[in-house]
Image (cartoon, grey):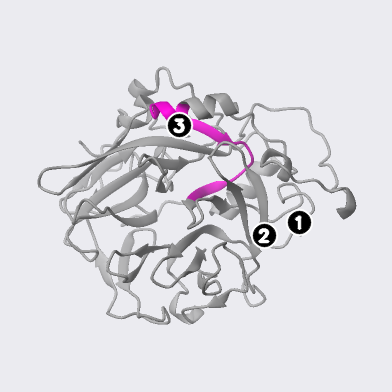
Amino acid sequence: MKTKHHHLPRHLLAILCLLTSTLCPLTPAAPKTKSPKSPPKSAQKTSTLADSIVLPTQPTDTPAQIAAGLKSHDRALHIAGFWIRDPYITRGPDGTYYLTGTIPPNEETRAAGDDPTPGVRVWTSPDLITWKYYGKIYTPDLTDSKNKNIWAPELHWLPAQNRWALIHCPRENSRLVLGPIGEKTPKGPWTDAMPPAKLVPDKHDASILADTDGTIWLIWNSKMQIYTVAPLNKTLTDYAAKPVNITPAGKRTGKISGETTNRMGHEGPGILKFPDSKKYLWFGTAWSTDIGRRGSYNLYYATADNPTGPYGPRRFLGRFLGHGYPFQSPDGRWWCTAFTNADTPPLPKETIQTRDLSDAPYTINKGGTTIVPLDIKILPDGDIQIRPTDPAYATPGPDEAQKF
């Protein structure tokens, strides 16, 4: 960005969210109660996703509602109620769904019986309906880091490598690590692929694309505005070519900020490749007004014939889907993860399409993890068109800086 927007770092905001109900409550204020202490290990029972978190959770949709919604593919589904940011869901080679994300490493939100140190925590499900806490699969070495948090972890099964890759940030702690060869579940021992010095200090929100030809691509954001991609060598220990900065074609001028820019956004990048299209789909996150923490937290995309571009115009992917990640279910349908990112409780969906949200950060997502159905079409020319099927997420709001 050409202008800096002063807003709280995510880890500080997360802590404040947990300590006060006036800054950004996930639910209306409730009577204060002491956080329950973890039971002795012999008495611990972790059977469901809701049971695995000490922090009181938001009620989710019922199993019957989720099952019906998975079938109809026409409305958002609230599948997990515990506090999480940047939720990421992927399906492993055994068909199991894995859910991870940014979870504060403290007594109030850690998994029951789990240790309170930073790490990557995972939940599993066979069907997106019934979930179990899988455990903390990765503990980083943060002895030399001032930042003791783990943000936006992602798990990627690499078919050509026959192993799992795990990548996380923030920029001071970014790591790309690999699981054992042949191990079908995401667990250690994990080994560093790239030397940490090649990922820090400013490769933020990094993500991976396992291309159809076996090439592994890395994409990241830096300085809250620059998106960069690079192919990795076969051992994933270094770049196979010089990193390339990418931008969407065209420019836009913010209605409120007056700033003219061609950036995709400021965080949450990813690249997808669809089997039926030769196009690459690059997506990123931005606030609808192009001003930090004002408006809705959205997802945008552009397409190209190569991961390095050139990319076409920036297009609208979905409202309130910021830092979500698309994933596919076995029936071929696509979904995108979503979470709450606002300073007030969620707004009702009924009138949201015509509501101007430009004065503050708002959302319709409840606390926890929501999945939103996506309609993805491969056009006759091979281009990709993507849009949520839930109307509350499908339309840019009046506060949108760009005209679509």
Task: Say the numbered circle drawn on residue 114.
Answer: 1
| Residue shown at the point (24%, 39%) measured from the top left | 402
**Badge 2 or badge 1: first in the primary sequence:** 1
* Label 2 packing within 10 angstroms: few (<14), some (14-19), many (20+): some
Are discs 2 and 1 less than 8 Å apart at CB? yes
Task: Say the numbered circle drawn on residue 70.
Answer: 3
Q: Can residue 75 be seen in this view?
A: no
Amino acid type indicated by mark 2: Lys
- 254 up-or-down from 344: above or below: below
| Residue shown at the point (67%, 76%) measured from the top left | 143
- Name the quarter where the C terminus is drawn: top left
Q: Report helix, strand or loop for mark 3.
A: helix
| Residue 24: percent from left, percent from top | 59, 37
- 174 up-or-down from 195: above or below: above
* Residue placed under numbered mark 2 in the picture: 136
Are discs 3 and 1 less than 8 Å apart at CB? no
- Looking at the rendered image, the disc whose residue lies closer to the viewer, 3 or 1, is 3
| Residue 230: percent from left, percent from top | 31, 72
Using the numbered discs, state the Cα–Cα distance from disc 3 to disc 2 in whole angstroms: 28 Å
Question: Which residues lie in the magenta part?
Answer: 69-89
**Badge 3 or badge 1: first in the primary sequence:** 3
**Badge 3 or badge 2: first in the primary sequence:** 3
Using the numbered discs, state the Cα–Cα distance from disc 3 to disc 1 in whole angstroms: 31 Å
Amino acid type indicated by mark 3: Leu
